């Protein structure tokens, strides 16, 4: 169940990253391979970081990485990563240029 919550948070991070980059509305058209490299134990903090990886005419690819930080330790490590492709749309849900 927690994995599903992480995927939802990653998708939200992708939307926020794309929107912040171009100030447009977006729809999700695909998600790439999501790599869960380590388990995320209960009681840990997670940090999600979204970065624009590629810009197309109407699409944008966002790389989202999830970092784990244990409450009583001063380190963080990447535990999940994935890519999301979103398309910019207008008020009529028609694709528009990203930039």
Image (tube, rainbow, N blue to C red):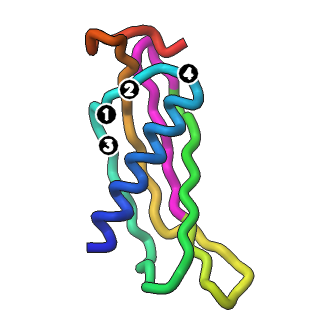
Q: Does the magenta portion include 26?
A: no
Q: Residue 99, image x and y in percent?
A: 55, 12
Which residue in the structure is indicated by mark 4?
Answer: 22
Q: Residue at x 41, y 23 (%)?
A: 25
C-alpha span from label 2 to label 4? 10 Å
Res. 28 mark:
1
Evaluate if marks 2 and 1 touch, with contact meaning CB atoms under 8 Å apart.
yes
Circle 3 residue: 31
The residue segment tinted magenta is 55-66
Q: Are marks 1 and 3 in contact (CB under 8 Å)?
A: yes
Q: Is residue 47 above or below residue 83?
A: below
Which residue extends farthest bottom? 72
Alpha carbon of mark 1 to alpha carbon of mark 3: how far? 8 Å
What residue is pinned by disc 2? Answer: 26
For the residue carrying disc 2, how many other residues have a C-alpha within 10 Å: few (<14), some (14-19), or many (20+)? many
Q: Are marks 4 and 1 in contact (CB under 8 Å)?
A: no
69 to 24, vertically: above or below: below
Q: Position of residue 42 (x, y in %)?
A: 43, 85
């Amino acid at each position: 169940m927690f994995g599903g919550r992480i995927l939802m948070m990653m998708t939200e991070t992708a939307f926020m990253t794309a929107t912040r980059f171009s100030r447009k509305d977006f729809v999700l058209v695909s998600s790439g391979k999501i790599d869960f490299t380590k388990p995320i134990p209960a009681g840990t903090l997670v940090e999600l970081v979204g970065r624009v990886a590629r810009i197309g005419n109407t699409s944008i690819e966002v790389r989202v990485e999830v970092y784990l930080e244990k409450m009583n330790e001063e380190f963080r490590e990447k535990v999940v990563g994935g890519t999301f492709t979103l398309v910019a749309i207008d008020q009529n849900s028609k694709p528009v240029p990203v930039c």
